[in-house]
Image (cartoon, rainbow, N blue to C red):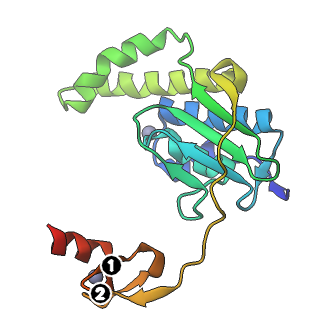
Amino acid sequence: MPSSPIPSFEEVVRFHGHVCPGLAIGYQISLAAMNALGVSRPDDEELVAIAETDACGVDAIQVVTGCTAGKGNLIIKDYGKHVFTFINRANGEAVRVQGIQPDIPERAALGELRPKIFGCTATEEEQRAYHTLTHTVVKKILEFRPEEVTTVEKVSVELPGEAKIFSSIPCGCCGEMVADAKTREYDGKKICIPCYLKKTA
Ligand SMILES: [Zn+2]
Ligand SMILES: [Zn+2]
């Protein structure tokens, strides 16, 4: 498969907007998955990812593995679990990858500060400490080999279909263009989901 170089963690941070441990684990999960499947970063839709969370790590998966929401090869099933399944379309091989929290002493202090930071009661000094600790934890997570901070399990998964090109039609109710495959039947007309929800509320 055609491939591009693996994006750096800095590129992932630029996409995501901030540095956080979840992003670092997501980065390592992506690398572990590609190692296990023996693929480099694909340019198109050779890999499919199923994310069991919609949290920070998903952004690392999108940048590093090229599985993105817009291309349809990233499926988010938000079970609130930092677990990702990757499928290689070329041969159907699949792995389920879970991040494991490595033993990093600074994590405890970070955990103690978190409620204050998110409850907006942290002093400036605490905010600075939180920032420094975050960067330390992230740096340490990235110093591990991907396999040391993940568990990789071979699984068999039904391969989702290739991204479909849907034809668009005007909604029989609001008139806005909508993908035909996403319409609902109502009163003999094909209408969009928001209209359908209003009609059937
Ligand atoms: Zn984040
Ligand atoms: Zn409509």
Location of ligand 1 given as a quarter of the image: top left
Q: Does the closest atom of ligand 2 sit within 8 Å of the Cβ of label 1?
A: no
Instruction: Name the one closer to the observer, 185 or 118.
Output: 185
Q: Position of residue 98 (x, y in %)?
A: 58, 27
Q: Quadrant of residue 199?
A: bottom left
Q: Residues within 10 Å of mark 2 (few under 14, many from 20)?
A: few
Q: Quadrant of residue 33?
A: top right
Q: Position of residue 23 (x, y in %)?
A: 52, 37
Quadrant of the frame with the N terminus: bottom right
Q: Which residue is painted at 62% across and 30% down in the image?
A: 97
What amino acid does circle 1 point to?
Answer: Glu
* Mark sitting on residue 185: 1
What amino acid does circle 2 point to?
Answer: Gly
4 sits left or right of 53 in the view: right
Q: Position of residue 179 (x, y in %)?
A: 45, 79
* Mark sitting on residue 188: 2
Q: What is the secondary structure assignment of the residue under circle 1?
A: strand
Q: Which residue is painted at 63% across and 53% down in the image?
A: 67
108 sits left or right of 96 in the view: left
